[in-house]
Amino acid sequence: MHSQSAPDEFAQHLNDVFRLFGPISLHRMFSGYGIYHDGIMFGLISQDTLYLKADAENSAAFRDQGLSQFEYVRQGKIIGLSYYQAPEIVLEDANEAALWARRSFEAALRANASKAKSARSQHRHET
């Protein structure tokens, strides 16, 4: 899909893929890139694979298509993150890309809202 040494070409391609969804930016992380919209990470690229954010509301759509969860090994243990491989149609159809991106962006917004609520709750208990 892309080479690690030339993210600009792939980023340009993803800007085209997600053109109906809106502007995106890529930020280097570990051995890949985080994909952001409005400052919120809703996707990632690792080992030439595009992954999109998932939660309880949209993860079934990924699993129903047999798409795998993003995993990595830390201290000998497999850690799964709330990102799933994007279906091939995302890279081929701008309407589908916008739909999947919107669902993943909404999952990221829900996760951020949950973290903020948890942080506020924690702060209240500390004071």
Image (cartoon, grey):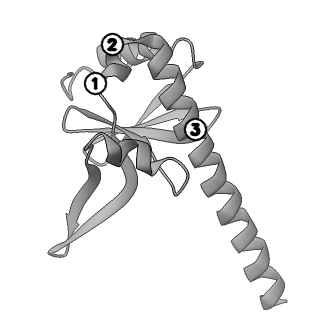
**Residue 35 seen in render:** yes
Q: Few, some or many C-alpha atoms within 10 Å of disc 2 (few <14, some 14-19, many ≥20)?
A: few
Identify which amino acid the numbered label 1 is placed on: Glu
Q: Quadrant of the N terminus?
A: top left
To which residue does mark 2 refer?
92
Amino acid type, label 3: Phe
Toward the bottom, the furthest residue is 126
- Residue at 72% x, 63% y is 116
**To which residue does mark 3 refer?**
105
Instruction: Single out the residue that lies furthest toward the left.
Output: 76
Q: Which of 81 and 10 is in front in this view?
A: 81
Dot in front, 1 or 3: 1
- Cβ atoms at labels 1 and 2 below 8 Å apart: yes
Residue 80 x/y as whole percent: 31, 62
How far from the left and from the top, in percent, is residue 56? 52, 57
Q: What element carries label 2?
A: helix
User: Residue placed at 33% from the left, 20% from the top?
Assistant: 89
Element carrying mark 1:
loop
Number of numbered labels in the structure image:
3
Q: Name the residue under label 1.
A: 88
| Amino acid type shown at disc 2 | Glu
In the visual, does 14 lie left or right of 18? left
Kind of element beneath mark 3: helix
